[in-house]
Amino acid sequence: MTVETREISIQSKGNCDIIDITSQVAKQIEESGVNNGIATLFVVGSTAGITTIEYEPNLVSDFKNMWDRVIPQSIPYEHNKTWGDGNGHSHVRASTLGASLTIPLANKRLTLGTWQQIVFVDFDNRPRSRKIVLQILGE
């Protein structure tokens, strides 16, 4: 069993910025010593998340709009009283989406569907430098 830990760095715009990171993850897997196993991605930070989606402009727009309906920025959040930075909604959105994702690997390839891409979602209310930890496990 081999375990390799790598890192992906991203510059995000905040405010529900959705970034397709599929090619960056695939490149790291191709360069790894693992042929078959799993890839686990973990977002470092509490105001961003990771998932899969069909990364096309209208669905990306639908996804962003869903967050505004379900967890709006415009309502009061107790967290905002703690730091005064106005990103209480960002923490709630990120914890709802989740900070990690695991994808099976077969023959050095992610086992994603044809229309399935890996996306990083930054919910914070300002641009950020972000880090995603990628662990590749297998043989």
Image: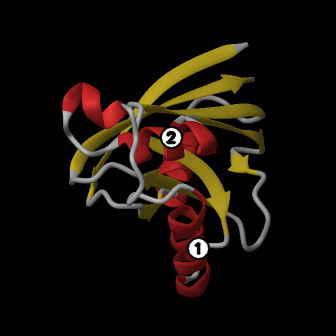
Q: Amino acid at mark 1?
A: Tyr
> Is residue 85 or residue 61 the one in the foreground?
85
Q: Residue at x 27, y 31 (%)?
A: 81
Front-lying residue, 88 or 101: 88
Please tell me which of labels 1 and 2 falls first in the chain. Answer: 1
Q: Residue at x 48, y 56 (%)?
A: 21
Q: Is residue 93 left or right of residue 128?
A: right
Tag count in the figure? 2
Measured as percent of width and height from the top left, residue 135 is found at: 57, 26
Q: Which mark is residue 55?
A: 1
Nearer to me, 3 or 77:
77
Secondary structure beneath dot 2 equals: helix
Quadrant showing the C terminus: top right
Residue 18: give x, y in percent of width and height.
45, 63
Whether 46 is drawn above or below 16: the answer is above
Q: In the image, what residue type sits under mark 2?
A: Val
Q: Position of residue 96 (x, y in %)?
A: 61, 42
**Residue behind mark 2:** 92
Residue plotted at (21% across, 54% down): 127
Q: Is residue 1 above or below residue 95?
A: above
**Which disc, if any, is residue 22?**
none
The quadrant holding residue 35 is: top right
The quarter of the picture where residue 104 lies is top right
Left or right: 28, with 101 as reference point: left
Which residue is depicted at the point 42% across and 47% down? 89
Q: Which one is in front, 137 or 16?
A: 16
> Spatial distance from mark 1 to mark 2, Cα to Cα?
23 Å
* Position in image of residue 121 (x %, y %): 46, 54
